[in-house]
């Protein structure tokens, strides 16, 4: 989501005639789009801000001003207090206030002192205070043509915010309640992306499964355009129909909460091959007691049933997940239940981390915090098991013939191209840079670590 919103902000800059600076030191404006999911992300952002604030002090000359803007979740969480921490920050633009960015650029273009710019925008002082005003609005376009992988893959937000309030998670506090994007705006963005030659999209939301739109729906004009209801599987079906004759041949989505994953969503995915045979399905833990304390809204039995239903309907699909260990009160028995669940599901890969308290969340004040050494040791066991599962699954795939999307040049060998299967597996093969952004076929000949290699690529005709 941060990447998609950064791309949209970058587009606003380009539309106003700004161009990317070769580095932050020579820029007229520096924008940091921040994340608050983990405390370490905020610490990195604060360190970067302090560096640019120091640079501003060295560039006091009127002919070389530097405007420093902070956006995103940390900006939303800390508000104007961020400027008290780091006085060199000129503008603090939370997640609900991105619509103000063109006005911030205008103030910088006019050379307004930051104090005057903030006052004009209602960022400080008076009844126009930012805290009273902004309402989240979606950007119309999110293709990162400057920094993305060749402009042939794009992120497409479909909703914003989260109503779940998992006890460890800061997201609902900085992103707010769920807001679904109008389907007409989503379809319009897909058409623009198709015109640009995009081949793969990823639908984004803090919890995509709970997408719900009430209003006019494209394709229902025969019904007089009357307001209707469109849920997530309905949106997927609408998108699949739109992409039948489109250069966009692959669709992924993030993130899916197991408690909201419906049988209808499984059916739509199974009926439409445009949806990749890979799914990131966050489990977080394998103990019902810990899941309840996390306020996840499902049990391990329900998760295992769902994983079984998905695999039955979509043979060959790979699953990945998030696993959080060391939650307050977690016991060795709880950890064993997580390891048992991993053994049963066998994820292709997992994002694994140990609990870090986030002030403002319900779990922050829970008793029974686990010591750092114990958390690291438990996390090590989870990582070790996942590495074994990943290796086993990848080895079983050697010899398979696959269709891949060619994403770029391998970082380790300039004579090889990096590609991705629809199951979210990486493979390298010899080829020309002119092939990047195309679909091709290859045979998975062997493994180098967790990356397959192939002896040759064969471009797919017409795709």
Image: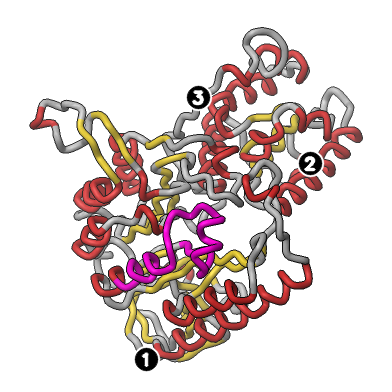
- Vertical order, 79 against 114 (above or below): below
Distance from the alpha carbon under mark 1 to that under mark 3: 52 Å
Image position of 346 (left or right of 87): left
**Circle 1 sits on which residue?**
399
Label ID, residue 416 = none
Return the x and y of residue 438 as percentages of the image width and height: 37, 66
Q: Is residue 20 above or below residue 225?
A: below
Stretch in magenta = 282-308
Q: Nearer the viewer, mark 2 or mark 3?
A: 3
- Name the N-terminal-most of marks 1 and 3: 3
**Circle nearer the N terminus (1, 2):** 2
Q: Specify the label residue 135 is tagged with.
A: 3
Where is residue 157 shown, x and y percent of the image? 43, 44
Q: Disc 2 marks which residue?
A: 49
Q: Quadrant of residue 346?
A: bottom left
Write the residue at 85% across / 34% down: 56
User: CA–CA distance between discs 2 and 3?
Assistant: 26 Å
In the rendered structure, which disc, 2 or 3, sits on the residue that comes first in sequence? 2
Residue 64, can we see it?
Answer: yes
Seen in the picture, residue 203 relative to 287 is either above or below; the reply is above
- SS assignment at label 3: loop
Q: Residue at x 21, y 61 (%)?
A: 267
Q: What kind of element bears circle 1? A: loop
Q: As rendered, which of 443 and 137 lies closer to the eye?
A: 137
At mark 2, the secondary structure is helix
């Amino acid at each position: 989501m941060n990447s998609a919103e950064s791309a949209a902000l970058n587009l606003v800059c380009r539309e106003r005639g700004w161009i990317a600076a070769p580095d932050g030191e020579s820029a007229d404006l520096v924008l940091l789009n921040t994340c608050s999911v983990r405390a370490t992300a905020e610490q990195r952002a604060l360190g970067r801000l302090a560096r640019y604030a120091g640079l501003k002090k060295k560039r006091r000359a009127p002919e070389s001003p530097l405007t420093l803007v902070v956006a995103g979740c940390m900006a939303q969480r800390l508000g104007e207090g961020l400027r008290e921490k780091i006085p060199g920050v000129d503008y603090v633009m939370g997640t609900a206030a991105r619509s103000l960015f063109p006005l911030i650029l205008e103030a910088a273009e006019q050379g307004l002192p930051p104090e005057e710019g903030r006052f004009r925008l209602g960022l400080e002082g008076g009844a126009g205070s930012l805290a009273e005003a902004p309402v989240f609005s979606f950007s119309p376009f999110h293709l990162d043509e400057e920094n993305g992988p060749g402009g042939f893959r794009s992120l497409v937000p479909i909703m914003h915010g989260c109503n779940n309030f998992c006890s460890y998670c800061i997201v609902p506090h900085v992103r707010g309640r769920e807001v679904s994007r109008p389907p007409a705006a989503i379809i319009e963005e897909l058409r623009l992306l198709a015109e640009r030659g995009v081949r793969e999209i990823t639908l984004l939301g803090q919890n995509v499964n709970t997408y719900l739109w009430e209003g006019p729906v494209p394709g229902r004009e025969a019904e007089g355009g009357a307001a209707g209801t469109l849920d997530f599987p309905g949106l997927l079906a609408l998108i699949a129909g739109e992409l039948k004759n489109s250069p966009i041949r692959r669709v992924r989505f993030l993130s899916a909460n197991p408690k909201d994953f419906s049988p209808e969503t499984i059916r739509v995915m199974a009926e439409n091959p445009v949806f990749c045979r890979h799914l990131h399905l966050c489990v977080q833990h394998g103990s019902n007691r810990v899941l309840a304390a996390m306020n996840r809204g499902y049990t391990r039995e329900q998760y295992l049933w769902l994983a079984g239903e998905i695999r039955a309907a979509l043979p060959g699909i790979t699953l990945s997940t998030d696993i959080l260990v060391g939650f307050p009160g977690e016991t060795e028995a709880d950890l064993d239940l997580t390891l048992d669940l991993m053994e049963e599901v066998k994820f292709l890969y997992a994002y694994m981390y140990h609990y870090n308290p986030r002030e403002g969340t319900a779990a922050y004040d829970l008793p029974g915090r686990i010591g750092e050494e114990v958390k690291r040791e438990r996390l090590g066991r989870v990582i070790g098991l996942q590495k074994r599962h990943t290796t086993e699954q990848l080895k079983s795939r050697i010899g398979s013939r696959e269709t891949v999307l060619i994403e770029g040049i391998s970082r380790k060998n300039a004579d090889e191209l990096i590609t991705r299967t629809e199951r979210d597996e990486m493979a390298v093969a010899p080829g020309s840079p002119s092939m990047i952004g195309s679909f091709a076929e290859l045979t998975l000949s062997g493994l180098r670590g967790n990356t397959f290699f192939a002896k040759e690529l064969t471009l797919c005709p017409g795709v």
